[in-house]
Amino acid sequence: NPVPTASWAEIFRAVPLRAMEPGQPYQRDEALLEELGYKTGQKVERETFMSRLTVHQQRHMCDLWKELRTRCYDHWMDEVENDKLMHSHGVLKEVVSRCCRDFREKSNHVKDVAMCHHEVVMLYRHCKDQRTKTEQPPSPE
């Protein structure tokens, strides 16, 4: 049975707000809120799954991921002897290539791109954490 969808305006109008007398605690209808939350969650899930990135948005995401890959490469070049950075860069490079190729050739759904984005950012943070040299803030003169 499909759950009837409601617009955001209908959802907000239906939220049970009761007039409160001074000194009385706020009371709300938990069952109604749960039902509305469930319906809203389903609506957001459907809209997110059906949403696709435009060609311009796809290019933007790939450029962003390539920028993170380049930063990781720069960290590695600052510490060429650091094998952990070399490995981190290699893994990040493979993931960026796979993600850009997959959502151009297979699926440009927002959900798929979001999973790739999470993976790329996580790997970039890992790369950044592998540095042994830390950047010193400029000294005030």
Image: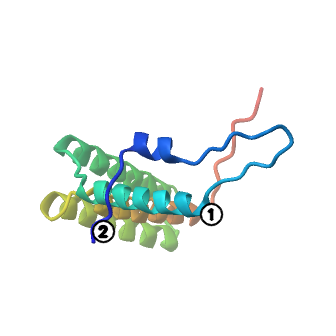
Tell me: residue 89, above or below residue 36: below
- Look at 61% across and 57% down and name the residue there: 29
- Look at 41% across and 43% down and name the residue there: 10
Residue 79 visible in rendering: no
Check the picture and name the quadrant holding the C terminus.
top right
Label 2, label 1: how far apart the Cα atoms are: 23 Å
Numbered label attached to residue 132? 1
Q: Which residue of the protein is positioned furthest toward the right in this rendering?
A: 23
Badge 1 marks a residue whose secondary structure is: loop
Mark 2, residues whose alpha carbon is within 10 Å: few (<14), some, or many (≥20)?
Answer: few
Which is more toward the observer, 79 or 62?
62
Q: Which tag, 2 or 1, sits closer to the chain's start?
A: 2
Residue for badge 2 = 94
Q: Is residue 48 left or right of residue 12?
A: left
Q: Which three-letter amino acid code belongs to the residue tagged 1?
A: Thr
- Look at 51% across and 68% down and name the residue there: 81
